[in-house]
Amino acid sequence: MAYDQHYDLIARLEVESRLIEADDLYNFDDGAVYAAHMDRLAQPLPNGEESPFSSRSPTSAHAILTARQVHLQRLIAHQFNLTKDRTWVQQFRMLGVELQPAKYPVINIVFRRSTEAVFNNIPVEIPLNTEVRSRIDPGLSVYTLYTARIEGLGETVTVPARLNQLGALPNLRRGEFSDIPRLLSFVESAENDGTVVSAGRPAETLVEAMLRAREGIRSGSLGRSTIDGTFDPENVAFQGRCVTDRDYYYWASQLGADKVNVLKGIQYGSEGTFRDLVTVVVYPTDVRDLIFSLMLPMSLDRFDVIPAEVIPIDGKIQVRVTPQIADFQVFNLVAGAIASQVNPPYGTWGDRNFPATLATALEQAEGIYAIPLIQLKHAETGQPLSELDIKPWNLLEIQNTLEIEALR
């Protein structure tokens, strides 16, 4: 491990204002230590005679020796103060956290069979480790990861190929890799089609490992992480655990929900309190089955996932606008504010104060300074909003049938 990564870790921890700061084990000032040594040397001898080291000159032999001693003491103290950094590293090792190595980028190469081979039904083989060079940068090459064949009426085959440089994928152009230094029988051409199988990555730093370990502890999974660039919730290494509301919220969001509500002790469609039940409400509704199947093994309590119930809302509102706003702009201002702050996946679960929420969002739009009237109702039944029985699994959605009146 690079020595300077300890300093990177400390710099990262210093900006975490909520962490408990670890004091230095050696925190004495060098000047004070030097002065204390010199004072001690200048003390009179036991028989009352003046000390031969009473001189305060920095060029005296004892002053030079004392300064050297303080300097060496500071070097040793510096290693003492790194102990807390090493403690972090040892904790990572104990938890099984290892620095992720660098990875090669992988891109797709399309090999095309010659017209003659297609016409005469001659199969073409693309051997393992076939090299294709960049026509822009001669130092860049890719090597195929397995042997592929083009047979029958097939004209092309797509083969993943590894770049010859470790680290993140550089900026590449489509069709850049087209030079085949080794002659392949009946292969007309080869080029990258622009698709990336794996973007590669540089070697993980100590700071990245700390953040990954922290997330792994919080989510209950210290296996592979999303830092790898892939997230496979069906892989057993990803299996976490859900204990707190935040755990349920985290995993539901990771698995595809744009908006999540966690209800403890509430069962959809039933009255009363269910002490050991956790109900997770998700939006959009089509991710419900996936989230339920993947989170069920993580839950320690009885568990259910329900889709959000969206209530369509319309009615009439009046908005006061500044003179600079044209009439045709009013609708766009209102629609933009509603789409970005009120309608799902925005808004508040079970919002019983929805008119105030809507008014606040509209007044934040540039050009609108007051909402004198809000009359809302169910868009399908016509029932006034104030009479609706709004539940924690409800989201309210303004429809485009909303009547908007501009006042000046």
Image (spheres, rainbow, N blue to C red):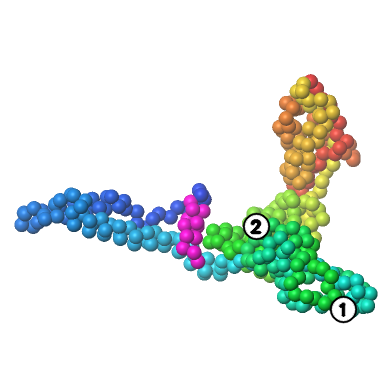
> For mark 1, does the 10 Å Cα neighbourhood hold few (<14), some (14 to 19), or many (20 or more) residues?
some
Q: Sequence-wise, which precedes: disc 1 or disc 2?
A: 1
- Quadrant into which the C terminus falls: top right
Give the mark count: 2
Which is nearer the eye, 113 or 170?
A: 113
Q: Would residue 82 be visible to someone looking at this image?
A: yes
* Residue 48 sits in quarter: bottom left
What SS does tag 2 mark? Answer: helix
In the rendered structure, the answer to whether residue 40 lies left or right of residue 337 reads left
Figure check: 26 above or below 352: below
Q: Position of residue 370 (x, y in %)?
A: 74, 26
Q: Which mark is residue 123?
A: 1
- At x 50%, y 56%, the residue is 8
Report how far apart the C-alphas of labels 1 and 2 lie in the structure.
54 Å
* Marks 1 and 2 close (CB-CB < 8 Å): no
Q: Would residue 302 be visible to someone looking at this image?
A: no
Q: Position of residue 15 (x, y in %)?
A: 51, 49
Query: Which region of the structure is painted magenta?
Result: 1-14
What SS does tag 1 mark? Answer: loop
Q: Which mark is residue 335?
A: none
Q: Amino acid at mark 2?
A: Asp
Q: Which mark is residue 247?
A: 2
Q: Position of residue 301 (x, y in %)?
A: 68, 62
The majority secondary structure of the magenta stretch comes to helix
- At x 40%, y 54%, the residue is 23
Q: Position of residue 209 (x, y in %)?
A: 56, 62
* Residue 400 sits in quarter: top right
Q: Is residue 392 magenta?
A: no
Q: Is residue 8 magenta?
A: yes
- At x 83%, y 43%, the residue is 311
